[in-house]
Amino acid sequence: MREIEAKVALAVAQKFTPLGVANLLKRFGSASGIVAAPKSELNKVPKVNKQGAEALAEVIRKGDHLRELEECEKHGVKLLELEDKAYPQILKRIDDPPPLLYVRGEITSHDDLSLAIVGGRSASYYGTAQAARFARDFAIRRVTVVSGLARGIDTAAHRAALDAGGRTIAVVGSGLLDIYPPENDRFALEIAENGAVVSEFPLHTPGRARNFPQRNRIISGLSLGVLVVEATRKSGSLITARLAAEQGREVFALPGKVDSDLSQGPHDLIREGAHLVAEPEHVYEGLEMLKLLPEEKAPEKRASATPQGMSPTEAALWKVLMPSDGLTVDELMGKTSLPAAQISSGLLTLEMKRLAKALPGKRYVRLEA
């Protein structure tokens, strides 16, 4: 059996952990050697699931590994083996690198400078806005943004990187033909055109909860550092941060409101020694390699300068609106002394001019011109 066929068979069996495969390779020398070994010998190897030998034999008997290879070719999915020159060198150096990576798009030498941005799925407007701000600056500095394609912070980071003309890599906890969450299926294709979508799971693997901690080590493994933006204490983002620290990566955390559950994760990380960051420059200062970044940076936005062409009502509202914390009409009445009807009319025209945004609960934030 060809080596690539044997590696795909091991992946499709889905009974072998990365460490288990590594131990098998040490024992039998190659994936084809593993496939040819007696079941009794496979079961003697540490970290190998006892059901693995049976599952592997069943995959080969049914030809599932060959169908998997055919589908990869049909859908333009590349398979990167650990020994390939194209396999990311930074990922290769972690203790348990994926023996086989499924890739849509391209991982290039430009991705040697990569930073991860991760956070909670139920992110606030503040969280997604900050994730986008950092991702935009990274992208403009030609740093690849790595994240997990999840709802909330991850999606905001990927989108901002693309909108800034940069590269982004999405590491998913499902197969590349069963993208999770499903609403990001088309977005994944867009990412593949300007970066890569990566998985170690067979093509049709659903996004099961147990897959994501395993996925997280690849997010951190591909990155020089990990920035956590909004996460509860139960968030998988903290697993990514812990894995990053174990892999020798720098961990950064963005502070938030002290009374918000979404701030507990980053604040815990800061107390444990993560870098507190408020600006992208704080991330660059924490990484020696990023001193080689090009000089260009995201243009500064003059938040204090009132955009031209506003009515007096619009100008009064825009000055008191905040970029992250939404204000209600009642709160705006207290800050401006304007009547409710006039405020509602002014907010509507500000929204039409894309200078304000309505959040859930009829709270409004300012958008920079």
Image (spheres, helix red, strand yellow):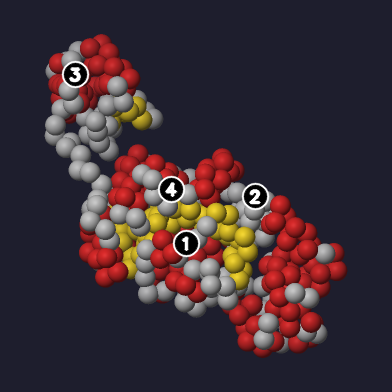
The kind of residue on which mark 3 rests is Gly
Using the numbered discs, state the Cα–Cα distance from disc 4 to disc 2 in whole angstroms.
19 Å
Query: Where is 105 relative to 89, above or below?
Result: above
Using the numbered discs, state the Cα–Cα distance from disc 2 to disc 3 in whole angstroms.
48 Å
Across and down, in percent, residue 268 comes to 32, 62
In primary-sequence order, the first of circles 4 and 3 is 4
Does residue 232 appear in the picture of this structure? no
- Residue that mark 4 sits on: 158
Could you say which is closer to the camera, residue 134 or residue 78? Answer: 78
- Residue that mark 3 sits on: 309
Disc 2 element: loop
Disc 3 element: loop
In primary-sequence order, the first of circles 1 and 2 is 1
- Residue that mark 2 sits on: 178
In primary-sequence order, the first of circles 4 and 2 is 4
Does residue 322 appear in the picture of this structure? yes
The kind of residue on which mark 2 rests is Asp
Q: Nearer the viewer, mark 1 or mark 3?
A: 1
In primary-sequence order, the first of circles 2 and 3 is 2
Give me the disc on residue 193.
none
Q: Residue at x 55, y 54 (%)?
A: 105
Q: Nearer the viewer, mark 2 or mark 3?
A: 3
Q: Residues within 10 Å of mark 4 (few under 14, many from 20)?
A: many
Quarter of the image where the C terminus is located? top left
Give me the disc on residue 108.
1
Using the numbered discs, state the Cα–Cα distance from disc 4 to disc 3 in whole angstroms.
33 Å
- The quarter of the displayed image where residue 68 is located: bottom right
In primary-sequence order, the first of circles 4 and 1 is 1
Quarter of the image where the N terminus is located? bottom right
Using the numbered discs, state the Cα–Cα distance from disc 1 to disc 2 in whole angstroms.
24 Å
Across and down, in percent, residue 208 comes to 61, 55
